[in-house]
Amino acid sequence: MTLLQTFLDSEWVFAFTFNAVLISIAQRLPLLTRSGWVHAGALGTILLGCLGWNGWLAVAIYLFLGSLVTRVGFSQKQKAGIAEGRGGRRGPENVWGSAATGAFIAILIKAGLGSQSILLVGFAASFAAKLADTFGSEIGKTWGRRTLLITSLRPVPAGTDGAISVEGTLASVFGSFLMTFFMVVLSLIPIGPYVLIVVFSGFLATLLESWFGAVIQPRFIWLTNEVVNGLQTGLAALIAVIFVIFLP
């Protein structure tokens, strides 16, 4: 089957058409930039074509929850100069920084390259990590009473790369659990040990991302926050898959 024939399969035509129509309507919402919506449409097409409705809905829920928590205390964060730019709207770099790992895993599953159940654990962990990061960052900026650098635990201003707080850390755990909960509800992973693996992997990757932001990121100009986010989600997926393969 040629690439063109694969694209013209009815499921892919539907996936592309559905996402194109949805994005044309949803772009009025203050969640993404105009180009961000276009890339979200491409992502949605990949997810719907590869994983069906459950995979698509999981990422739609992630986008909604991430955008929602970004709005928490937004005016306060703006005054402090630590709010997300563009009024909290996410651009293409944010879309793929959050979802490139998940999209790649979805393509592997569709191509039959690897165990679907194991790959879905990696898929779930990648988004659990990203929601954990978003919850921890946004809640920590708003309600974190004491912000410390993860490497030295010395006080630093809120919003500093590698900064953590008790409030933000607890929010990260909750964010990882919440995303895992929806992965179970959507039957992407089963109830049982996989749940603990995904929650733990998502949270651990978030802590490692904070360390990476404090130690490695300042040394390289090309290591933007979006690149680090991509590394974080990839690391979460890898940790989860290793746990599933090597733990009884």
Image (cartoon, rainbow, N blue to C red):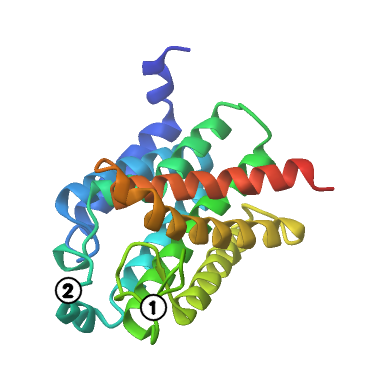
Occupied quadrant, residue 133: bottom left
N-term mark: 1 or 2: 2
The answer to whether 38 is drawn above or below residue 83 in the figure is: above
Residue at the extreme top of the image, as rendered:
2
Q: Label 1: which residue?
A: 147
Q: Label 2: which residue?
A: 81
Secondary structure type for disc 2 = loop
Q: Residue at x 34, y 45 (%)?
A: 227
Residue 200 at x, y percent in the picture:
63, 61
The answer to whether 164 is drawn above or below residue 98 in the figure is: below
Secondary structure type for disc 1 = loop
Q: Nearer the viewer, residue 88 or 48?
A: 88
Task: Name the kind of residue labelled 1 in the image.
Answer: Thr
Residue 11 at x, y percent in the picture:
45, 34
The answer to whether 105 is drawn above or below residue 204 in the figure is: above
Q: Residue at x 46, y 63 (%)?
A: 151
